[in-house]
Image: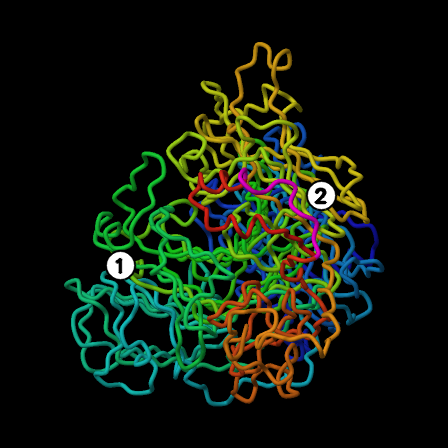
Amino acid sequence: MFTLRREYVAACAAAALIMPLLTPAAHADESQLINVLLGRTPTSNATLTHESADPTIPRVTIKDPHFATDGDTGFTPNNSGEDANVTKILAGAESGNPANNNGFDTWNDVYLQYDLGESREIGRILLHHNGYQAAGSTFKNVKVEVADTPTFDNPTVISNTADFEETQATHLAPQTILPYGGKISARYIRIWQKGHFIKNFNGNWSGYSNGVAFREIEVMATPKDGETLPPRAESRNIALGHTPYVYGLTPTNISAISDGKIDDNYAVHNSLGQRWLQFEYRNSYTIKRVVLALEPGQYDSIAVDVRSAGSQRNGREIYRQRNIQVGNDPIEITLDGQKITGRTIRFTINKSNGEPTKYKEVEIWAEGLDFNESAPEYTPPTSAYDTLVWQDEFNGDTVDESKWNIIDKMWNHAAIYNRDAVSIHKDNDGSYLSITSTNYPSTQALIDAVGWDQYDAATPPHKVTWSSGRVESKNKYSFQFGRMAVRAKVNDSKGIWPAIWMLAQDETGHDEIDVLEYLGQNPWGAWTTNHYGVLGVSKSAHGQENFSPVAWSQDFHVYEVEWDPQAITWYIDGKKVFTSEQGKNVDGMHTRPMFPILETQVGDGWVGDVDYRKQETKQNSSYLVDWVRVYQRADQPQVRFDDLDPTAPTNSYTLRPTERSEGLRFLSRGNANYENKNNFFYGGQPRYEDSRLAVADNAEGPQYLVYEVPTAKDVHLTTYYQTIPGKTSQVSNSYGGWITRGYSIRDNFPGMIDFSLMSSPDGTTWTPAPMTVVDNFIDPQPGYARTTFDAYDLPADTKYIKVVFPTIPHGAQAASKPAIPATDIQLAKVTVLQREIPAPPAPPQDDQNTPKPDNPGNNTPKPDNPGQSKPKPDNPGQNGSGQDGSGKDGSKPNSPSPNKPGTNGQGPSNNAKQGGHSSQGQATPDSAQKTPHKTPQKMAPGAGQGPAKASSTNAPSLAKTGSDLTILLTAAGLLAVVGAFTRRVHTH
């Protein structure tokens, strides 16, 4: 029944009920309207997330956001008789209590909101609500409104709040919405609802459901020029020259399947048994005829079906035969008189006798409005972060290790990461970072081939037979707030898990942004996820799976994230796909610098196991990355960093102390508990931190580090504390299980053994900085607890900061408490966010009477073209020779050239490597560049500029040098750097 507020609304609703029954003559303009919602994904105000059968999968608010706009209006029931292919949100929590209608009384009206991309003249909206095989529903509080802005400041209601009742006579028919007064122009649409009431047709059961779900939503609008093309009079073979998606092992000679020749030049599906491949398209087509030419022989089964999208769970079968003998003539499937439309045609075949299926040719004859299958050209999203500050185009012959760490010999899931799995791959189209995943016959064969850096007493299980790779910019580059874009082509198949993600530079274990996680067994879904909270305390995730009608692994795509203090927003190919604002009350939306990671994980966890029968998992496949680019505002604070390793190369990202107290001790790897690498290990991932500082046993007085960092804004101290022996507890791992947690010695001395920070405008007057503390998940003793101390918004006139080590309690302070060895408290990293990075000092005026060396300022000869391994574009930072950078003419556009930190965009850094790479984020790409992309538009003078090279003539001296420091470095085998460290050092 209807509960309506106005009589004319009732009239419209009544008309909507009988609309599906009217003859075509009743809709004279039906052919003049087209569905402009196809392929679009919604946003929502719903907050309740869907439960998942797998606790490792991020919980989502919008389930299957692509189904309601995939063009398929058909009802496909699941095993429970419910609609299987629906987009769904939840109006509230179900209580199970009939007294409050299963919670309905407390639910909210929730909406799906769609952006049409531009204002369209809307004539009709069809809502295909979710359905049931043996029941009808009353959909509660349905309302439709449109607006010209995404915030709906001045909405127009085109169907007021009312229930829509489905009867047996109108079972599964759409609800038709007609705008009051005729067509209406708008860009945004909101569809409201508050769950639905279900009643079996036999009357023996009824109840409320919190689901707001649609198998399809059609927004019928007046076509623009170019959208009114009728189907072609003669159908076209849309398979010709099109490469199908093949699930399973890498096929052989796959291009022969659609080369237009029915001959014995076979395309081979190498997976055995019943296997499938499918032709996938961006446009929808009406299928008229299918020709399938196979190798002659006996087949257990052959089936062909048509689907609205590659990810659709079921299709409309157009051919099936069992135990069939195939001869030389092809199988022809004619669909005259049937209107079967879709974007995917799947062939599922089982060759007898365990033989692989061999295809001579596939033809798919179809009609369509548009036969252009080209991917849309990538255009960067409009963003305040428009200055390129860091990039890698992967145009060299080897991976640039001034930018990336290549993880070596680390066991993770079913693979061991190693250097040999990471390389630069070149072909006729370009140059790429390649991360290759390869299966070995056994675990021992894998270890023999690539090595293994063992941690703890753990031994890899037998399923660890895979070699794979990971690169990360940890300790070499990080940024806070901005936009990162990565152009990549993922590899796939069951158990393969390529990813693009970011972690906090101090690796707190809860700041994580997944730009892309691609689960190889579901090739049409690309996950984008915000992880926040502390494991065992508040760990959670908010994400979305983004669907494509064509498998993501079929081509390169640009995966992009914009991260600011208010929200994290993801884009794919320049199109916004997801925004998350969750976690602010936990992490403040990730307010620590983060670094990029590129890797392919294999097996276990969320992705599940590989196929041990070796039929559905490619045994060797590569993840290709074309480029990585980071954008920020031109005036944005930059990150400076000290990993406490005095032997490491320095660059504009690096921070080194200008003063150090004499009672500090250098720690690295060793056999002692306080240096044992097994104790600096978190969440299955080794830390690889080989430089830490602790207070020496005989130290007297306060111990500290002083840094000159003009306009320092935020400071983050990464520290380690020993754990308490014998004290543990069981806590939830947030994934449905339990883990053992340890306790830090800080618990025994609340506030007494914390690090502190001082700031100063002149290096003499010091002011304490307020600090907050974040405890990472704590592994049990003998592991060390990882604790981060954060100081935010230091005074604007700050020029110096002082990191003060805690004083070990003695006497009455330590009464009844276990003694604390000095090595139980360690500093591992100092990360600083700097408001402005000063320009390097102007060079002195030339004195013509002063003799000059042949190579002034450097006694080491420079390379012919220092800091640059390849020719620069004619106009660095622009799009090449006056073009838009899109490469439309078939050539590659010139790559962007960011301002080089420390050089003001004028030349190579003083720290440029002899081999042609600067050591900080400088890319000097080929004039022949990657496609397709727009190059960055704006380059602000001095953006990303770092400090000048250390000077030995104008700096205050180190407070303590000489023998004490020599002893410190000798203990670590580092005598070679004593001379450098005992010089007077000053950092601008």
- Classify mark 1: residues with Cα within 10 Å, few (<14), some (14-19) or many (20+): many
**Which region shows up in magenta?**
954-964
Q: Secondary structure at mark 1?
A: loop
* Residue at horizontal 73 percent and vertical 76 percent from the top: 847
In front of the other: 46 or 182: 46
Label number found at residue 969:
none
How far apart are the two marked residues, 2 and 1, measured between alpha carbons?
59 Å
Q: Position of residue 859 (x, y in %)?
A: 54, 69
Residue picked out by circle 1: 615
Occupied quadrant, residue 379: bottom right
Q: Position of residue 544 (x, y in %)?
A: 56, 53
Q: Position of residue 357 (x, y in %)?
A: 23, 70
Query: In this view, which residue lies farthest toward the left?
Result: 353
Residue picked out by circle 2: 801
Disc 2 residue type (three-letter)? Ile
Determine if the magenta segment contains residue 74: no
Any part of residue 898 in sight: yes
* Residue at horizontal 44 percent and vertical 77 percent from the top: 287
Disc 1 residue type (three-letter)? Gln
* Residue at horizontal 60 percent and vertical 23 percent from the top: 808
Predominant secondary structure, magenta span: loop
Against 558, is 254 above or below?
below
In front of the other: 66 or 136: 66
Against 485, is 715 above or below?
above
Determine if the magenta segment contains residue 963: yes
| 2 and 1 marks in contact (CB < 8 Å) | no
Q: Position of residue 234 (x, y in %)?
A: 46, 89
